[in-house]
Image (spheres, rainbow, N blue to C red):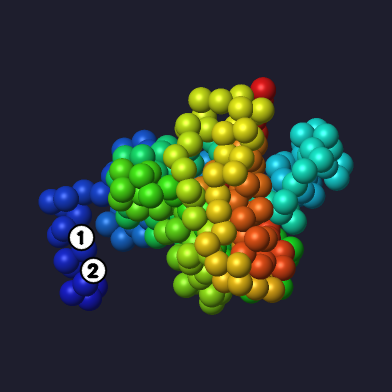
Amino acid sequence: MDIKGVWGRALHFFFPLKCHCCLRDLSFDCQGPLCPECLKSLQEIRRPYCRLCGSFLKDGGDLCRFCFEEKSVNFKFSRSAYVFEPVIRELIHDFKYRGFKKLGAWLGQRMAERISYYPEFRNYDCVSFVPLSAGRLRERGYNQSEMLAQEISLRRGLFLLKGAVIKKKNTVAQAKLDRAGRIENVKGSFSCVSPIAAKDLRIILVDDVATTLATLNAAACAFYEAGAKEVACYTLAREIFQN
C-alpha cells in the first residue's frame, strides 16, 4: 500500500467518514457523500418520459397531463438527472439551505454524467443558470444553480454564460404556493440586462429542482430577450406537482 493509502486509512480511523443521509460508516477511499445503499436508491429518469417536461411516463405516451394542457412554454424542453425522492431531496436541501456547499461539486458531477443520457442536448453551445435575486444571494452566500452549472461546464467542455439575465425581485418561496400561484409568483421576476449577451446561442439553463417549471419558464423568457436562439432546461431533480 502506498503512503497515500496509509494516511487515508489513518485519517479514517480517527475521523471516520459517514454517509450524508443514513450516517452509515463509509470506506476510507469513498469518493462521494453517500454509502452504496443510498447511492443505489437514487432514481434516474428513464424512458418513456414526457417530450416537453421530462417527467417519467409510467403508462407511456408523448406528453404528461400538465404539458398536454399547457399553452405557454418558453423553453424547448426540460430534462432532469433524477426523480425528486428522499435521498436526493436531503442532499439538495442541505446543499441549498443548510450551507453544505461542498455537495455542489459532487451533485454537479452527477448531472454532467447524466446529461449524456439525453441526446437532445448534443448541439447546445453553452450552459447558464437560474439567477437569484440580490437579496437572496446575500442571504444564502452562493447560488446553488450556478455551482451546478459551473461543474457541468467544466466536465462537459461547455462555455458558462454569466450576466445575461438577473432576477430583479425577491419572490415568495415556490413550495408555499399552488400551481397557479407559482406561475404568478415568478411572472416578470427575471430581466435581460444585455440584449446581445446570448445572441444566437443555444443555451442549457440549469436549476436544482423542476416542479411546475414556472421558474424555468420565466427565466427562459428573459434569456430569449438576451438574444438566445434556443433555451432548454436541465435540473438535478424532477418533482411531480400533485395539485
Q: For mark 1, what is the residue?
A: 9
Q: Who is closer to the viewer here, 74 or 127? A: 74
Does residue 68 appear left or right of residue 177 in this picture?
right
Residue at 48% across, 66% down: 162
Rendered view: 180 above or below 37: above
Rendered view: 173 above or below 197: above
Residue at 53% across, 41% down: 41
Mark-to-mark CA distance, 2 and 1? 6 Å
Q: Quadrant of the N terminus?
A: bottom left
Residue at 21% across, 49% down: 16
Q: Residues within 10 Å of mark 2 (few under 14, many from 20)?
A: few
Q: Quadrant of the C terminus?
A: top right
Q: For mark 2, what is the residue?
A: 5
Q: Answer whether residue 210 is visible to the viewer in this image.
A: no
Residue at 16% across, 58% down: 11
Q: Who is closer to the viewer here, 206 or 192? A: 192
Residue 161 image point, x, y percent: 52, 69
Does residue 213 appear left or right of residue 131 in this picture?
right
Outermost residue on the right side: it is 61
Q: Who is closer to the viewer here, 129 or 119? A: 129
Q: Residues within 10 Å of mark 1 (few under 14, many from 20)?
A: some
Labels in figure, total: 2
Pointers 2 and 1 in contact (C-beta within 8 Å) = yes
Q: In the structure shown, which secondary structural element does the residue marked by tag 1 occupy? A: helix
Q: Which mark is residue 31?
A: none
Rendered view: 242 above or below 74: above
Residue 183 image point, x, y percent: 64, 35
Identify residue type, mark 2.
Answer: Gly
Q: Quadrant of residue 226?
A: bottom right
Q: Quadrant of residue 227?
A: bottom right
Residue 173 image point, x, y percent: 47, 32
